[in-house]
Amino acid sequence: MTDYQKIGFKAGIEVHNRLQTKHKLFCNCLAKFSESKPIGIIKRKLRPVAGEMGQVDVAAVYEYLKDRTFYYEVFPETTCLVETDCEPPHELNKEALEIVLQVALLLKAKIVEEVHIMRKTITDGSCCSGFQRTALIATGGILETSQGPVRIANICLEEESAGIVDKNNNEVTYRLDRSGIPLIEIGTAPDIKDPEHAREVAEKLGMIIRSTGKSQHGIGVTRQDVNVSIAKGARIEIKGVQELDMIPQIIENEIKRQQELIAKGKKPKDETRVAKEDGATEYARPLPGGERMYPECDSITFIITKDFLSKIKTSETWEEKTKKFSKILPKEMIEQVLRSEYLDLFEKFSKEFDPVLVANTFTSIIKDLRRRGFETEILTEEQFDELFLSVNKKLISKEAIPNILEIACRDKISIKEAIEKSGLRALDEEQLRKIIKKIFEKYPDLVKEKRVSALMGEIMKENVRGRISGNIVHKMITEEINKYSEE
């Protein structure tokens, strides 16, 4: 077993989470992915500029020297002149600021008195303007963990980058609907004790953000950057870790990589690496520094007054949520819901629909669909509302939910359309009795011998599966057999 203290292990983590707001951070465009086709494409070359101290960031220069051409897809309702850097930013999104302040209060961080917008030079193409707007909101927080407190170095509010569409040699295509969506960034001090501790820290920070009920849903919403170093090694920033379970393996691989270089008499270099799906990493660029930052002169400083801060309401703690959920959920389901990215939707829908049904949908069913390759992130709050309402109105049975969601994801259609396409519209008890009577007439010997399981198998073949609860079918078969015996 590795003695992490002996090898001089140090690690910190940055958690980035896309926020669920109505509008983007600096304009009135909708903060969501567009369902429309692009209405235009912008072609750009990006160049690095000097930071506030007059120096140019080495990482920005490295990306610039790749001499790539970037194309940006423009969409209606989700893209405007702000995203294309053809118009100054509008006023800072207060809704996004309030969410980040909630998180800062939960982490007991010291909130700044003035919010100054900065530009962070980025020339890899992910920002059409060549920079990302970011603002420091709080410092000096504390996250309690199983291995002691972890200091929170900074909490920032910034713009999400553009989403990549295609790479072709030196030409890269991005879509601008994602660009500018509010993003919270939380960075810790290098207090992480070991790889498993890093996973715990990332998970707990993600859970705190989701507890606000204002985190977007789906794959890619939360991303982790892990900073790792060992004695005689270097500080490595590993970007783009999406799966929490991969964090320990990625860190272990990085420790091994540095140890092997040191054993060969080579000095590891400070650099940025990108996480791969197999847990390995690959070189991306030199480690960026403070040279890439400079003020955003087109934005107004926002003053956080005591009156403004007093109106920020924090969400429930995990302990409070656990106590509340214990009244409506089995014990084994509570932790799954708390860890789910759909926590906020569970809290909303469980007030109106069966909590166990809602919890099972957002944990087991969604997890299974995702494991089988379905894009569950395209499912909207409105679709889930329609789904649970359909169960309540007995239009479908709860057994049909996996099939309905699978069709909705696969064909990108509404829940109503998925129900019709599935052929799983619910059976009422009268319809079921007619099917049972038909099977009884066809298999009288099975009825005489009271072979309920065999009869149930035949009945399920009659387009019954998924249209009514199996318990109801079993109960009704038993009732009808008893009636037959009495006759």
Image (cartoon, grey):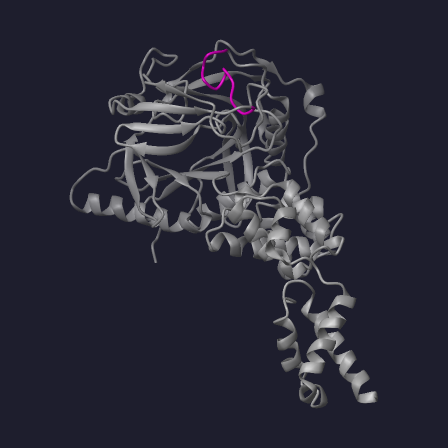
Residue 397: x and y, percent? 69, 59
Q: Residue at x 37, y 41 (%)?
A: 10
| Closer to us: 387 or 417 | 417
Q: How many marks?
A: 0
Of all residues, the one furthest to the top in this rendering is 297
| Closer to us: 294 or 409 | 409
Residue 422: x and y, percent? 60, 56
Image quadrant in which you'd find residue 332: bottom right
Placement of the N terminus among the 4 image quadrants: bottom left
| Closer to us: 202 or 391 | 391
Instruction: Determine if residue 5 is in view.
Output: no
Instruction: Determine if residue 280 is in view.
Output: yes
In the rendered view, tell whether residue 408 sits above or below residue 486: above
Image quadrant in which you'd find residue 472: bottom right
Q: Is residue 46 magenta?
A: no
Answer left or right for 291 relative to 370: left
Which residues lie in the magenta part? Answer: 77-87
Dominant secondary structure, magenta: loop
Residue 99: x and y, percent? 62, 30
Q: Residue at x 46, y 48 (%)?
A: 244
In the rendered view, tell whether residue 448 sits above or below residue 356: below
